[in-house]
Amino acid sequence: MGKGGKGKGKDKGGGKGKGKVKGKGKDGGKKGGKGGKGGKGKGKKGAFKVVIEAHRHEGVFISKGKDDSLVTRNMAPGESVYGEKRLVAEPEEGSEEKIEYRVWNPFRSKLGAGIVGGIGAMPIKPGSKVLYLGGASGTTVSHVSDMIGPEGVVYAVEFSHRSGRDLTNMAKRRPNVVPIVEDARQPQRYRMLIGMVDVIFSDVAQPDQARIVTLNASFFLKNGGWVVISIKANCVDSTAAPEAVFAMEVDKLRKDGCKPKEQLTLEPYHRDHALVTGIYRAAKKKKDD
Ligand code: SAM
């Protein structure tokens, strides 16, 4: 299982590598639940300075401070999605543009936990086309929207109408999010809405998730595209040991054409969860390569 991840890459999403930012405490004091970090700096009336650095995964940043926190560049400046803290960067010299970032709480997001936990390769990057299964109210979808930036698109499928309403509202200020209130087991119902994608991310917490993912892959994922799956062990089999469940799920994916690349525990943020990545219909290596 290889390791990917680049150094400080280009950011089509527009973020610069470094910058001083001032905190804007627009979250009403909430720090995004358990483990919410995000610039606790004290000083004059909520203003504090932290430094923003590019993360080794493109489209993700780190706010340096007493506690480092993961942040993404806000596609919809002025808005929080789930009560998360926002940080506004001072314009760089010669520029008037203020850049706003949102703190990404790994306790609220499996993808965020995977990045904080050190996932080696992250196929979701500026410009990516992503099919997201299990979008819920859009907590993680909103960070994916930030990561991929204006040149990317995330199709977010969610079958609960209640969550779908929040997802749809969130998408109003994010032109790169296409909310789809449908059952991910029925991709033929939304095939007219989606083009081919680079990545499928899935967090549906269903026992047949592996089948749901490969079914969607057969409709929408390009050959050599990536699957990134969050597995909650007791959703698949509550009687087996989590490690055995993860191995079983990886095996199912392999049988359906996904070459496993990485498996990462999401502890301590999400108990008995793993993030698994793989490449769909990976090109076969030539013998003389
Ligand atoms: N990924 C979300 C986030 O980080 O913000 C949380 C997802 S939550 C664990 C699982 C979601 O999958 C629920 O909102 C549930 O309604 C949705 N879901 C479950 N089965 C589904 C299906 N067959 N099709 C679409 N959505 C499904």
Image: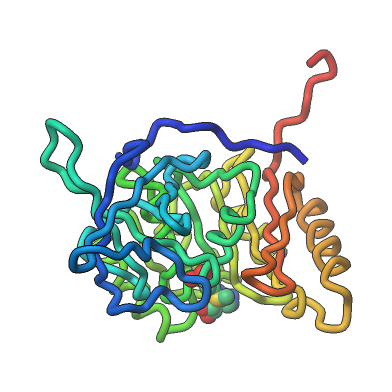
Residue 99 in the figure: left or right of residue 221? left
The residue at the point 60 percent across, 72 percent down is 204
Q: Residue at the front extreme?
A: 43
Q: Is residue 99 left or right of residue 166?
A: left
**Residue 194, can we see it?**
yes
Identity of the residue furthest to the bottom in this view: 162
Q: Looking at this view, is 137 or 157 the one in front?
A: 137
Residue nearest the observer in this picture, 78 or 214: 78
Residue 163 figure quarter: bottom left
Q: Quadrant of ligand 1?
A: bottom right
Front residue of 90 and 96: 90
Residue visible at 25% across and 63% down in the picture = 43
**Residue 75 in sight in this render:** no
Left or right of 143: which side holds 150? left
| Relative image position of residue 183 (x, y in whole percent) | 53, 75
Question: Total label count?
Answer: 0
Please state, as top left, top right, bottom left or bottom right, where the N terminus lies in the image: top right
Pick the quarter of the image with the C terminus: top right
- Residue at image x 58%, y 65%? 110
Estimate the x, y position of residue 245 in percent, counting from the top left: 83, 69
Looking at the picture, does residue 127 appear above or below residue 30? above
Location of residue 273 (image quadrant): bottom right
**In the rendering, at what x and y percent does residue 174 appear?**
28, 59
Q: Position of residue 156 (x, y in %)?
A: 44, 64
Q: Quarter-wise, where is residue 23 in the image?
A: bottom left
The structure residue drawn at horizontal position 53% and vertical position 60%, both measured from the top left corner, is 112
